[in-house]
Amino acid sequence: MYSLPAAALYVFIVFFFLTLPLRLIIYYAKSYRVVIMSRRIADWILLLLTIGATVSTATTFLFQPLQPGESVFYKYILPASGSFLMIVPYFHIMSWLVGRKPFYTKSHLQYLEYFTLYLRSFNDERKDKKLKQRMTKALSDWFAVYAIGKPDEFMPPTGAKRIYVDDDWQEIVIEMMKRSKLILHRINTSDNYLWEFEQCYKKLYLQKSVFWADDLQEYAKFRTMLKHRFGLEFPLLEDRKCHVAFYYKPDYTFRIIYLTTKEDYERFRESFLQDHAELFDANKSYLYARHNKLSQVVKLWKDSNIPDSVQRWSWSAFWLPEFYLICQQIKYRVVAFFAIVATLAGFAMVGQTSEAVFRAVLIRLITMVIMGRNGRKIVWLSRHWESLAFYEKNEYWGSWVAQLLGVIYVIFWIVAAILMQVY
């Protein structure tokens, strides 16, 4: 029997040793199929360890002797329920600790509609990680950023989301170029990147491209190669010790921005918004949701700028608000989960009277109504969904898992009640 902090250390150590063979297999195999299979095994290992740790912690409260004058509700029900409810947030926390992130295969292409494609050399992955994250974050505030993943990565790195494909990566890249709203180029002279640039040039995708130079000597070679191979004249950059971003303006001249501080990245974003107003006007319905989150969440009526299917009533969010929030793929789901649980527990424990329990029940009913009406909308507004179809897929599975957890929760208490009577 463990407390949750002690169980966290236990899960972390066991997970590391159980997945060590998988890490070695991925590193030496360098096969996308092996990578995907090994990662899925690692996910199941982490999930099973998490369930075991939380259920073990929850049961410790049920076997403690009840002292005279102590309440069954505060002695058993509240702490055991709280520990059980930790299963999913505990899994998210452990995922963050071990570096686990979502990964995708080429079947995910059918869901990509609003996204930025990130083209780079695999050799650049370890260079300037902090600045790389700044650039991808600057663009992901508009559309999710995707890149082709390396076949020897055990866990996807931070920054762009990764799609893992087989030897048909060139076909996948061409398809993603066509579907993408923007294309981010991290300039280098590797053969694969030069092939990717050539496809962008031939298919007239340079106008929706952002070029990013982090090595000016490499950029000078790239610029010379472009002039000889395609007759293209890219800008001559000043020799500064910083990164540089540039792109085509509507008049086919270049806007160049030298990136040194966070303020430079913000200036880059503002300039790009102004120079590509038509792109953002064409997607204003999607971007509207991204920039009006708070005002939309508190609305109880429909808004014409948000898809109708997003604004439907959700029974899963109504009956199971905590499980619903924590099971959906949204930002800050752990924070939202703890906010609801802590609020309800606080109202129930103040004074430890029947009136306190009544207040907690009343607050929960209000929360249930708000979540039932706005639950789906909260999920839609909380992150950059690559398409409405991808949102619907995650909504379906998130609701299904929430309902399953609700059933397991009831079974947990039925079994617990029987064991408490027996022992």
Image: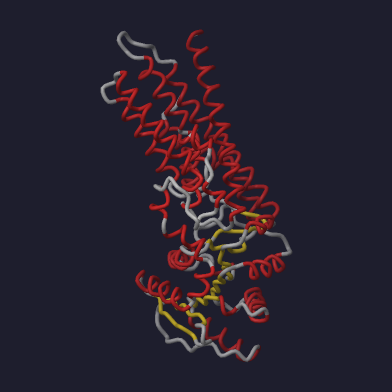
For residue 313, above or below residue 163: above
| Residue 342 x %, y % | 35, 34
Q: Is residue 276 left or right of residue 393?
A: left
Front-lying residue, 285 or 130:
285
Residue at 31% from the left image edge and 8% from the top image edge: 68
Q: How is the image coloured?
A: secondary structure
Residue at 44% from the left image edge and 36% from the top image edge: 369
Q: How many marks?
A: 0
| Residue 149 x %, y % | 61, 60
For residue 407, above or below residue 301: above
| Residue 116 x %, y % | 56, 66
Q: Is residue 358 left or right of residue 9?
A: left
Write down the quadrant of residue 177 in the picture. bottom right
Front-lying residue, 124 or 174:
174
For residue 357, above or below residue 240: above
In the image, farthest residue toward the left: 351
| Residue 99 x %, y % | 50, 50
Residue at 69% from the left image edge and 65% from the top image edge: 172
Residue at 52% from the left image edge and 26% from the top image edge: 409
Front-lying residue, 89 or 15:
89
